Amino acid sequence: MELAGIKFGLNALRNVPDAERHAFHQLDSQFHSMNRLVVEFDATVAVFDYASLHWNHPRREENEPASDFSRRQLEMRQISRWPGILAHNAVMIVYHYHRAIVSIAACMHRSPTISMHFAYSELIKIRKSLNSDFPKFEDIRNQVAHYIERAGELNTLEKHAVGRVFIGNGLIGRTFANTIDGKLHTIDISAASTEKLNNTASLIFSLYDQAVGQIMDEKQRQYWIKNFENGSVPNL
């Protein structure tokens, strides 16, 4: 998987007032956070797949010492717990990914220079699309983070069940499922979910590049594009 990237780094912003540079450094940090979260989700899927592939019910082999069989049983019990732990991690990654996008929008607003060129309407569309890809992600995150408190509430089953069925942090195959407010909500621990996150980053980075490209003068813009396409990033 090829990670999304930006064409115009911080060194390209010579025309931005000094007072606004802190906002751009925060932007740079959030861009890196988005890519890091994509990598972490991808790794989560990889370990999930490994656990699913290698887990089995061990059987004692002929003449196998009891201690060796016990050790293999313990290993399999541990591996059997990995998918649930990884699913919880995936939910938190999606939540933090959304928060990074919120922070990016806030950073844009703190820089009038770029704010006047940034397509906020497109960012709203991107966020809506991501919300559609991961519906009720915040509620699912809260279910993971506060499961014990909610499990102790008397009306939890009545409030959240679909009919008579209540699912709390359930894992069905590679689908993490919860019933919340009478509806079923899921997140897939899959390469397709990783791709959705990476594509979202690519779209947001493109909006940033378009805005910064309008700030830069033409000679500077062409210099950066040429070097970016050649695989090197100039240090102006």
Image: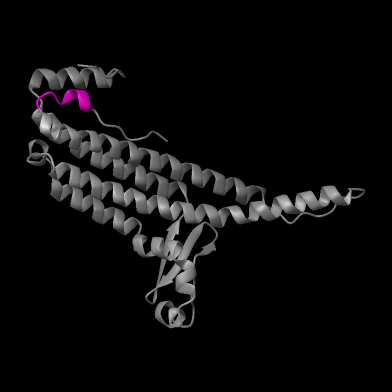
| 204 in relation to 19, above or below | below
Residue drawn where x is 30% and y is 45% of the image = 200
Q: Which residues are magenta?
A: 9-15
Residue 231 position within the rendered picture, expressed as x and y whole percent measured from the top left: 31, 19
Residue drawn where x is 22% and y is 37% of the image = 206
Residue 29 position within the rendered picture, expressed as x and y whole percent measured from the top left: 29, 36
Pick the quarter of the image with the C terminus: top left
- Asked whether residue 8 appears in the rendered view, the answer is no
83 relative position to 13: left or right:
right
The way the protein has been coloured in the rendering is: one colour
80 relative position to 2: left or right:
right
- Which of the 4 image quadrants contains residue 25? top left
- Which of the 4 image quadrants contains residue 141? bottom left
Pick the quarter of the image with the N terminus: top left
- Asked whether residue 82 appears in the rendered view, the answer is yes
Number of numbered discs on residues = 0
| 225 in relation to 40, above or below | above
Residue drawn where x is 8% and y is 21% of the image = 218
| 227 in relation to 93, above or below | above
Work out whether residue 166 or residue 148 is closer to the camera in this orientation and state it.
148
141 relative position to 108: left or right:
right
| 14 in relation to 151, above or below | above
Residue drawn where x is 44% and y is 45% of the image = 41
123 relative position to 4: left or right:
left
Residue 162 position within the rendered picture, expressed as x and y whole percent measured from the top left: 43, 78
Q: Residue 107 in magenta?
A: no
Residue 119 position within the rendered picture, expressed as x and y whole percent measured from the top left: 13, 44
